[in-house]
Amino acid sequence: MSPEVDLELSDLGTVHFIGIGGAGMSGIARIMLADGVVVSGSDAKASAALTELSQLGARTFIGHAAEQVSAANTVVVSSAIKPSNPELLAAQQLGLRILHRSEALAATMKRHTVVAVAGTHGKTTTSSMIAVALRRAGLDPSFAIGATVVDLGANAYHGRGDIFVAEADESDGSFLNYRPKIAVLTNAEPDHLDHYGSAEAVMRAFGDFIALLPEDGLLVACADDEGSLALSDAAVAAGHRVLRYGRNERADLRLRGSALEFRGRQYQLELAVPGEHNRLNAAAAFAVGIELGGETEHETEQLLAALAEFRGAARRFELKGSVDGVRVFDDYAHHPTELKAALQAARTVAAGHRVLVLFQPHLFSRTREFATEFAAALELADAAAVLDIYPAREEPILGVSSALITDLAAHTEHFADPQQALASLLDQVSAGDLILTIGAGDVTQWGPVLLEQLNARTAGPGERGSNADEA
């Protein structure tokens, strides 16, 4: 447990963020600014996030330099910041308080009723659904989520209510810095083995997260996931209050077809976002809404209406556009279970047409551990072009490449050159088909390029494609 967990915003003074443009960091900075904290920050390059934060009152810098922390009392870093970063070194030399991103978020959540959403998959969408539903119910929650919520137009917000919805990232164990009143566990599978070392250690971390609940807290857990169900059983044995959701007969909030059954009542669940995984995510959000907002007819109607209108979060099966009947979607999935869920949703949306995939594996260690599972998931596509591994924080591992995946899967090919991958997909696509760019790296940049190339292919000189549109 971090000794910094008990800090409040008033303890922090002027706060400087190293890497302020990142999704998580910019969200925390946004909330601190709304709370009157003096904020500065730096990032390697200009971005829309930096521009928005500057307009909100933050002092922002492009590039990292030691002198940029000189006015700060507290410096915030994420796990992505290298020990050699000049601002981090300067902060250490000056004896400034240095907080991990999760510790800074814990300070912003102090004195709130915290809903922390954890799990190997589905955290962002479930957090977004909860925030949207609670706002529709009139509770005006604060939230900090790892992607922009389409319906709310931001990844973070300082609400007037006393509820705070937070996406709880388990990747580096930092979610143990939170103090939830309600903990949501969407699922629990092995991942981030570069940090944890073993599947058993991952499960222990989720168990430690649940143990943070107070006596009057609540665990909302998915009964359809083996890991989540086992952890919920352990939570019951430890004396925690637990509400399970899913299609499993052990679920308290039971999905049956498109209906939810809870405490002798049935509610119709209609969604605009596709996929069985999103039905489960919505069930979790409904359970939280019932816990915090109540079960009157009006309250449940508001929750269900919000979920029916929910349009998703950035990079979660996000429609980027279409040209002459070819739709291009983008998704953040980077674990085999997520990849499978995204492709199952894509097959539903494609409605009998072909699904083509541009996939970028994320991390050498994850590719090594799950190559067989990635290959099996890609079998759901009619064709898949697989890019080189996005390394993120890792150094290459001898013998580990995207070929580990493509050698095991039919209708897939490894491309070192992204342009050749795009050309391969464009040669195969026809009207009605769906192209999905997918992965946690920079594969997202190729969706707009695909749309441009589709448009160029179908347009005459000086014209645009007949059905080109922006999402």
Image: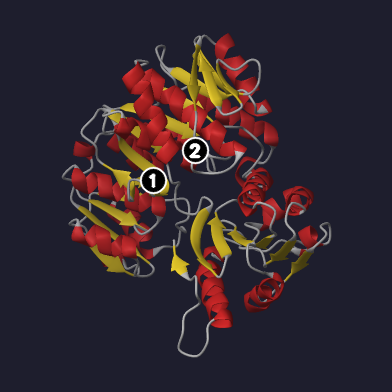
- Asked whether residue 446 is in view, the answer is yes
Give the residue pinned by disc 1.
101
Relative height, residue 193 to residue 246 (above, below)? below
Instruction: Tell which residue pokes out farthest to the front in this image.
Output: 466
Q: Measuring 57% from the left and 66% from the top, which residue is drawn there? A: 325
Q: CA distance from mark 1 to mark 2?
A: 33 Å
Which one is nearer the viewer's eye here, 70 or 331? Answer: 331
User: Which mark lies nearer to you, 1 or 2?
Assistant: 2
At label 1, counting other C-alpha atoms closer than 10 Å, the crowd grade (few under 14, some 14-19, many 20 or more) is many
Query: Which SS class for mark 2?
Result: loop
Q: Which of the 4 image quarters holds residue 331?
A: bottom right
Q: Residue at x 56, y 44 (%)?
A: 274
- Check disc 2 and report the residue beneath it: 271
**In the rendered structure, which amino acid carries the disc numbered 1?**
Arg
Left-right relation of 283 to 435: left
Quarter of the rendering containing residue 32? top left
Q: Residue at the spot x=36%, y=42% of the render?
A: 144
Left or right: 234 as drawn, with respect to 86: right
The C terminus, quarter of image: bottom left
Residue 404: percent from left, percent from top: 79, 59
Q: Nearer the viewer, residue 200 or 324?
A: 324
